[in-house]
Image: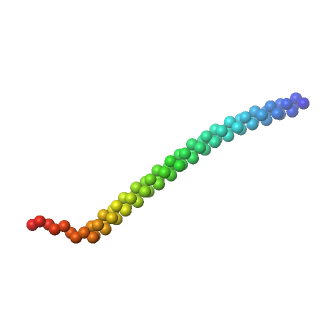
Amino acid sequence: MRNMEQYLIDTADRCIQLARAGREMANSLEAISNDLMAKAVELDSARDRQSKDRHSEDNLAKDEQIRPPAKRKV
């Protein structure tokens, strides 16, 4: 019967180790998830800024095409 008791104690200890490792892993995964989400937001913001800059440049080019050239004073 001593072997059974030792087995149960060892198994209980292993369960505790796995539970702790699981919590640590869960915390690590959550941190990685947060980093990935922050990077996605950063890239999305950069793409939006680029798109707005291109849109502004396109509008400026269109305005220059529509406007008659300025008259020069002689």
The residue located at (80%, 31%) in the rendering is 9
- Compare residues 59 and 25 and report the one nearer the observer: 59
Residue 71, percent from left and from top? 16, 68
- Compare residues 1 and 33 and report the one nearer the observer: 33
The residue located at (64%, 38%) in the rendering is 24
Q: How many marks?
A: 0
Colour treatment of the image? rainbow
Residue 68 falls in image quadrant: bottom left
Residue 38, percent from left and from top? 50, 47
Q: Is residue 66 left or right of residue 27?
A: left
Question: Where does the C terminus fall, quadrant-wise?
Answer: bottom left
Return the residue found at the far right.
1
Q: Is residue 14 left or right of residue 29?
A: right
Q: Is residue 13 left or right of residue 2?
A: left
The residue located at (70%, 37%) in the rendering is 19
Residue 1 falls in image quadrant: top right
- In the figure, 73 relative to 30: above or below? below
Return the residue found at the far left.
74
- In the figure, 55 relative to 16: above or below? below
Residue 37, percent from left and from top? 53, 49
